[in-house]
Amino acid sequence: MLQVRGLHYRYPAATTPALVDFSLEARRGEILGLLGPNGAGKSTLVAHLAGLLQPAAGQIEFDGEALDDLRRRAPGCIAIAPQDFAFYPMLSVAENLRCFAAASRLSGTAARQAIARALAATRLEDFVATRVEHLSGGLKRRLNLAIALLPTPGLLVLDEPTVGVDPQSRAFLLETVRSLAASGMGVIYTSHYMEEIEAVADRVVIVDRGRVLRQGSLTELLAQARGQVELQLEAPLDADALAALAGEIEGQLEVAGVHLKLDLAATASPVAALARIEARGGRIREARFGRYSLERLFMNLTDTRLRDQ
Amino acid sequence: MMLLALIRKELLALLRDPHALAALFLMPAAFIVIMSLALQNLYAPPLRQLPYAIDSATESPAARRISATWAKAHGTARPLPATPGAVDEALRQGRLAYVLTLDAGLADALSDLDPPRAPVVHLRVEPGLDQGAFRTLQAELASAVGELRAALLQASFTGESPRGSQSILPFMAVEQLGSTQRPVSAVQQNVPAWLVFGMFFVVTAISSLFVQEQHSGALARLAALGVPARIQILAKALPYVGINAIQAALMLTVGAALMPLLGGEALSLAGIHWLALLMMLAATSLAAIGFALLLACLVRTHAQANTLGPLCNLLMAALGGIMVPTFVMPGAMQQLARLSPMNWGLEGLLTVLLRQGDVAEAAPWALRLAVFGILGLALASRLFSRRITP
């Protein structure tokens, strides 16, 4: 459905580009998790999808048609639910929805039906007359989503949709996103909450410094840790034991105090490796084998240093 | 449909912002009432109410005639304090605004063809009396003494007293051109002045909502939904044309109907060119909205929106003759006042309301305002798209 190919963009005053040869694909009925630290280029990508920025190089196509051309014909083909509460707090829920429905070129019956659908999808029917400034954070998030659903988009882009909401609202929002994808809508879901991405995403794209670092299905990405063993011992091993282990284990050994990291050869057995460690006096407190958490994969790819931008 | 919905959004946002409503309607109306009442005396010194006393050293018919003439125009004299020291003290403290002293040789001096060796009539005023009132008293006293001298001389030459009133006023006709046929009042200056000021105060409401929309991402969202920038700008401008129209109707009503009830003079709209008035109001509105949108596109924070707009307005008002009428400014300041768009609005409205100016006479002011407003809108349009991109 959405094809982004070789996208490149640099902000006028910036010294480094915000997007470099950036490519991804979003499919109908699928949730694409977009992960990246601050300054990775997610917002710049979203701004391109919203039509607010024009690519310096590369193409964005939607169902084979250039996004620019399609936007002129059908501006609501891609809807954005931004991270901020992009609506009017002094208006009621219904007034906001009517305003954005009209902005989506909906009027009369079509507008009423779209508003009813959006209210039902986000379960905001009981709050139509409530001024938005009086809504809780969770309800505001739902309104943000409801507005995005008004033009019945083919692709929905959700930018940090659950920031600042309680667990119940988060669970509801995730369930709503799943059901939207199940109805055939494509979804790009950006979040800093790895467990959310793990919970909802069918595929994941990890980006940093404007580049795509890794993309694939969640299973594929997490399986890339095959052969990795991470251990925590009761006490550090002495130098003789470590020197002996380095010669006995088929693979690489990294040691940091009580933490051991093994990168085993394809033919090596993790059970044998653990047995050798125990034989050399190591008492194992915790072991992890064969599967990253998404967060560890993300941190490994994007490094753990603080990002100040 | 899209435009109407966005206009509705602007109006609802404004209606639910009591501070903005107060700034747009209550503040200029309050300024009209307060400033018109406060400056009433500046335009019409209350000479009749000033407390005065007469210190007459003679009971001659001439002295009695001056006292009677003066009392007719200025009310009954207060009792004269007992001693000269008490008189001075009463003047210093302002309990008496002035004292007329008539010397013993008054009648002889006035009947003599030669000028007197020393003054026989003295006017002493309190320290706080303004120059306008002082000069008016001086002129009135000179007139009263002159009339009496003319009558006494005529009697001594012809043996007959003048018939009827000895006042010189029947020989003169005084006329101030304009619709009101009477001197400019504080109301007539203040209504157009504070109306223009109030109309320019749309800047606060417009820029405040604009910054909020920008920060929340609502503007970007509307743009992402395909709402053209020109529609967004138009939706922000048009409601405030209506708001400015309501302001104009309200302020003119305050001047014409409320001020007389509060003891002030009424604004007279009789005989004005209504088309010229509408033209001036439309041009002022265009300038105010263009300026407001430009400023809204320039500021980035609520703090800037809430301070820069009012600050610019206050400077334009102070410079443009809103707070202090330009006719009391020195020449150089009057030239500077011509730089303020508020001055263009004020002078244009005064042309229509005071001088019965028609469309052609008000057109130069309206043209300046229109050019200013269109430039503001054009620049705002250019800046607008930068405000919605990340």
Image (cartoon, rainbow, N blue to C red):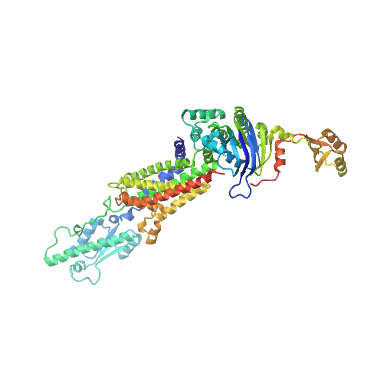
Q: Is residue B58 left or right of residue A102?
A: left
Q: Nearer the viewer, residue A306 or B173?
A: A306
> Residue B191: x percent and y percent?
35, 49
Please give left or right for residue B141 compared with residue B223 in the image: left
Drawn side of residue A59 relative to residue B190, left or right: right
Residue B59 appears in view: no
The percent position of residue A61, horizontal first and vertical second, equals: 59, 36
Residue B226 picture location, percent across and down: 51, 38
Residue B87 percent coordinates (x, y): 31, 63
Q: Quadrant of the N terminus of chain A?
A: top right
Image position of A80 with respect to B359: above or below:
above
Q: Is residue A131 above or below residue B335?
A: above
When asked about the image quadrant of residue A290, the answer is top right
Would you say residue A188 is visible in this rendering? yes
Judging depth in this view, the residue of A104 and B329 nearest the camera is A104
Task: Give the total number of marks visible in the rendering.
Answer: 0
User: Residue placed at 18% from the left, 60% from the top?
Assistant: B166
